[in-house]
Image (tube, helix red, strand yellow):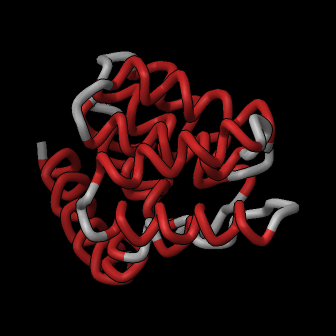
Amino acid sequence: VRRIQWNRDALSGLRARVRAQAGSEERNNLAMMSAPVTNSKLQLDRLQQALQHHRAGRLQEARRLYERVLQKDSRCAEAMHLLGTLFGQQGDQARSLEWINKAIAREPGNALYRKNAAVTLVQLGRRVEAIAAYEKALALNPDFLEARIALGGLLTDLESHNEAIALLLEA
């Protein structure tokens, strides 16, 4: 009983410490998405404009611009990913995952895309798949605190406290 209590206390302390470090990371999640790769200056401008609308909460305008970018360049992973996150914000998790997975197919080495797929999988109740997605994000970027915290929380929810503590201690 004492060990379980220590594990819970340690996990709470670690979560608070790591959450404090990651606070700016979470707030800047959309800022991390601001380095789009596209061949056209017009496409780049559209994507940046869409991102500004997205950040400001003007989701319909952002969606319209993401879709225009994709009409011109159906291979733009960043537009796919951002459209997926937008659908998630609107509560359409199935479409969110569909678009984020399209982005991952284009850029499989993008840890942010993997983390956002994991978030969506959790919302869909697909926790085992979410664990795998978080682990892949962390394999791609071991310093990705937001993914580490989320995976630790998910493991805690699944009562894998020792795994969660070990994961957070790696931070």
- Residue furthest to the right: 39
Q: Toward the viewer: 116 or 151? A: 116
Residue occupying image coordinates x 18% and y 53%: 8
Q: Is residue 4 in view from this perspective?
A: yes
Q: Is residue 77 left or right of residue 61?
A: right
Q: Is residue 114 in view from this perspective?
A: no
- Give the answer, above or below, for where 43 lies relative to 85: below
Q: Position of residue 100 (x, y in %)?
A: 56, 34
Q: Position of residue 84 (x, y in %)?
A: 47, 37
Q: Toward the viewer: 71 or 171? A: 71
Q: Is residue 44 left or right of residue 123?
A: right
Q: Position of residue 124 (x, y in %)?
A: 32, 19
Tally of numbered tags: 0
Q: Quadrant of residue 85?
A: top left
Q: Quadrant of the N terminus?
A: top left
Q: Is residue 106 left or right of residue 26?
A: right
Residue occupying image coordinates x 22% and y 49%: 3
- Give the answer, above or below, for where 94 lies relative to 28: above
